[in-house]
Image: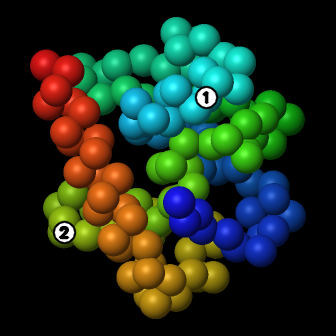
Amino acid sequence: MKSLSLGGICSDFSCASCCKDTQMILSLKDIEHIKNVGFKEEEFCFKDEDGYHKLKNVDDVCFFLKNNKCTIYDHRPRGCKFYPIVFDIDRNKPALDEDCPLIDKISDKIVKSFEKDLLKFVRVIKKEKTSNI
């Protein structure tokens, strides 16, 4: 699966704003992958009022953010791998999250290159939600 790499810009910048006050949506595959790393689902995941699985926050930061670094970076969820490309529900297409201070480093061409994978991920999430109701 494709992931967005800004060539070290994110880790060099060390802002981790994408991991603060957010609840990244998870697929069942993401959950299993993280469990296989050694975490218990109830530690890092919850189901929101709409039935979507999401990463927990502790003190307003992602459960996996420690010392401003992701402790499961190599095993992070698909939504994290796409970030700062997100799915804009209102426009029904990928877009850049305006909260990311590095979006000026990402071209429209790069965003477009993630469209197919992101749409597939969104379909999986919606299907999983529907099958859990």
Q: Label 1's element?
A: helix
Labelled pair 1, 2 in contact (Cβ < 8 Å): no
> Residue 68: which disc?
none
Return the x and y of residue 19 as percentages of the image width and height. 62, 42
- Residue located 80% across and 42% down the image: 69
Q: Which is nearer the eye, 129 or 21?
A: 129
Q: Which of marks 1 and 2 is nearer the N terminus?
A: 1
Nearest to viewer (mark 1 / mark 2): 1
Return the x and y of residue 53 as percentages of the image width and height. 37, 27
Question: Is residue 84 at least partly visible in the picture?
Answer: no
Taking the image as shown, residue 98 lies to the left or right of residue 20, namely left
Q: Give the quadrant of residue 120.
A: bottom left
Number of marks in the image?
A: 2
Q: Which is nearer the eye, 106 or 113?
A: 113
Residue under label 1: 34
Return the x and y of residue 124 as percentages of the image width and height. 28, 45
Q: Estimate how packed mark 1 is, as few (under 14), some (14 to 19) or many (20 or more) residues with alpha carbons within 10 Å.
A: some
**Where, quadrant-wise, is the C terminus in this rendering?**
top left
Taking the image as shown, residue 128 lies to the left or right of residue 25, namely left
Q: Estimate how packed mark 2 is, as few (under 14), some (14 to 19) or many (20 or more) residues with alpha carbons within 10 Å.
A: few
- Residue located 61% across and 28% down the image: 34
Residue under label 2: 91
Q: Label 2's element?
A: loop
Q: Which is nearer the eye, 95 or 77?
A: 77
Give amino acid for label 2. Answer: Arg
Give amino acid for label 1. Answer: Ile
Decide: is 34 above or below 43: below
